[in-house]
């Protein structure tokens, strides 16, 4: 294994605790993690580079994760179809359908089940080859 | 302390650490296989000295004590534990094959919380241990005993086990250190927002603390933050300053214990 084929994953999460935690966990799955701490920087980073997957917290400053998800889905090309796993502590008690209507592929409630998350990451990054 | 009683989680905490003390290898292995699951961390000691050594670095929820052991028997070990660690929240159960070990004295008089006769019936035993522990935790929460949190109450065993699959020991410690530094900063901000009564900021910080602590299995902090968040949202007039003090106390408990708990698991 001289050349490792890694996946580009954008993690949108304002807490550095969860950011670092996900970085460590996903490293095992050959993921290269880019961090974004607010909704606007998710969009900025997303426009600049190509990502295989986005893990999106909904509770983000500047622009909410929900809003950022809708903006990405409104892009009418391949780029707008990137898989998005939404995560949330659901502070506002929104019904789950809100997240799917915004366009996430999966939704996970915090506290995160790490085994389940890894399973989903595998599922959405596997088909690319 | 009384406030915490009110804040008992709706679901029982399954997380538990159990110390098995038995000189017989097969008995220890049998009990391990009976009790092993994702929420349980098991420690086993083959004699009383070893058990006492364990208790210098671990605060278990349950201690299963064989009675007939060479050198130090279960009675002596029990009295040494009670003397050295009176503030430990552990339930101590006698496990014996000999009913006349206790003569005419009851196990309760001798200081044990329950007596189990060998042979142990696997399923029944596990359920009984679970029930006794839940009952004990409820009693403890509603009393004014100045008992410490057990290791498994402070940090969920299941979460540690899950994280260990993906993170090395060093990385695991880093993850919890991150939480310590971020949360200590957040608590300072919380303090100033409470002074200026900025409810939106207060809620946002509580929500982050709740999410982070729950993700790391820090149940007391997570449940407390959740409860305060809930009470504020329901516009109850509450003394935020008191809650802050309590949250700081819970956080301090975490800070002074997590290194020990994570290093030795």
Image (cartoon, helix red, strand yellow):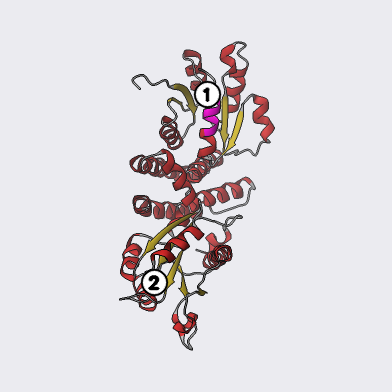
Disc 1 element? helix
Q: Residue at x 35, y 66 (%)?
A: B46
User: Which residue of the protein is positioned furthest toward the bottom in this rendering?
Assistant: B104
Q: In which quarter of the image is residue A71?
A: top right
| In the image: residue B71, left or right of residue B67 | left
Q: Is residue B106 above or below residue B236?
A: below
Eye-nearest disc, 1 or 2:
1
Q: Position of residue B222 (x, y in %)?
A: 51, 48
Q: In this view, does B140 lie above or below A65?
A: below
State whether residue A14 appears in this view.
yes
Q: Residues within 10 Å of mark 1 (few under 14, many from 20)?
A: few
Q: Position of residue B261 (x, y in %)?
A: 38, 53
Q: Where is residue A21 in the image (x, y as percent from the top left)?
A: 43, 36
Figure quadrant of the N terminus of chain A? top left
Q: Residue at x 51, y 33 (%)?
A: A118
User: Which residue of the protein is positioned furthest toward the top in this rendering?
Assistant: A77
Q: Which of B118 and B1 is in front in this view?
A: B118
Instruction: Quickly name the residue at label 1.
Output: A126
Instruction: Quickly name the residue at label 2.
Output: B86
Q: Where is residue B77 in the image (x, y as percent from the top left)?
A: 36, 74
Can you tell which mark lies on residue B203?
Answer: none
- Mark 1 and mark 2: Cα distance apart in space: 54 Å
Name the chain letter of the residue that bears numbered label 2: B
Q: Is residue B138 above or below residue A64?
A: below
State whether residue B148 appears in this view.
no
Residue B64 covered by magenta stretch: no
Which contiguous range is marked in magenta? A119-126
Disc 2 element? loop
Q: How crowded is mark 2: few (under 14 residues within 10 Å), some or many (20 or more)?
A: few
């Amino acid at each position: 294994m001289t050349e490792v084929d890694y996946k580009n994953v954008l993690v949108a999460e304002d807490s550095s605790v969860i950011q670092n935690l996900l970085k460590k966990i996903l490293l095992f799955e050959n993921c290269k993690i880019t961090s974004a701490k607010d909704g606007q920087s998710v969009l900025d980073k997303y426009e600049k580079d190509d990502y295989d997957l986005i893990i999106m917290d909904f509770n983000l400053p500047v622009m909410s994760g929900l809003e950022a998800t809708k903006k990405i889905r409104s892009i009418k090309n391949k780029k707008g179809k990137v898989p998005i796993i939404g995560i949330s502590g659901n502070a506002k008690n929104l019904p789950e359908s809100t997240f799917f209507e915004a366009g996430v592929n999966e939704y996970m409630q915090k506290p995160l089940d790490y085994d389940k998350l890894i399973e989903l990451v595998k599922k959405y990054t596997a088909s690319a080859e | 302390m009384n406030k915490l009683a009110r804040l008992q989680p709706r679901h029982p905490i399954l997380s538990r650490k159990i110390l098995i003390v038995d000189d017989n290898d097969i008995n220890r292995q049998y009990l391990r296989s009976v009790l092993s699951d994702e929420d349980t961390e098991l420690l086993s000691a083959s004699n009383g000295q070893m058990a006492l050594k364990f208790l210098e670095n671990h605060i278990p929820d349950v201690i299963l004590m064989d009675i007939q052991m060479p050198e130090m028997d279960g009675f002596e070990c029990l009295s040494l534990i009670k003397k050295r660690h009176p503030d430990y929240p552990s339930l101590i159960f006698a496990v014996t094959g000999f009913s006349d070990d206790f003569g005419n004295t009851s196990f309760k008089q001798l200081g044990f919380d329950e007596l189990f006769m060998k042979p142990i019936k696997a399923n029944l035993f596990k359920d009984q241990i679970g029930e006794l522990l839940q009952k004990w935790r409820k009693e403890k929460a509603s009393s004014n005993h100045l008992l410490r949190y057990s290791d498994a109450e402070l940090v969920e065993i299941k979460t540690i086990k899950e994280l260990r699959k993906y993170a090395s020991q060093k990385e695991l410690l880093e993850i919890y250190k991150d939480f310590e530094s971020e949360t200590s900063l957040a608590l300072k901000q919380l303090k100033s927002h409470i002074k200026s009564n900025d409810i939106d900021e207060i809620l946002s910080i509580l929500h982050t603390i709740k999410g982070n602590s729950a993700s790391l299995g820090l149940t007391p902090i997570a449940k407390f933050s959740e409860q305060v968040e809930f009470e504020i949202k329901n516009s109850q007039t509450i003394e935020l300053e008191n809650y802050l003090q309590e949250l700081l106390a819970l956080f301090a408990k975490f800070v002074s214990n997590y290194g020990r708990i994570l290093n030795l698991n």
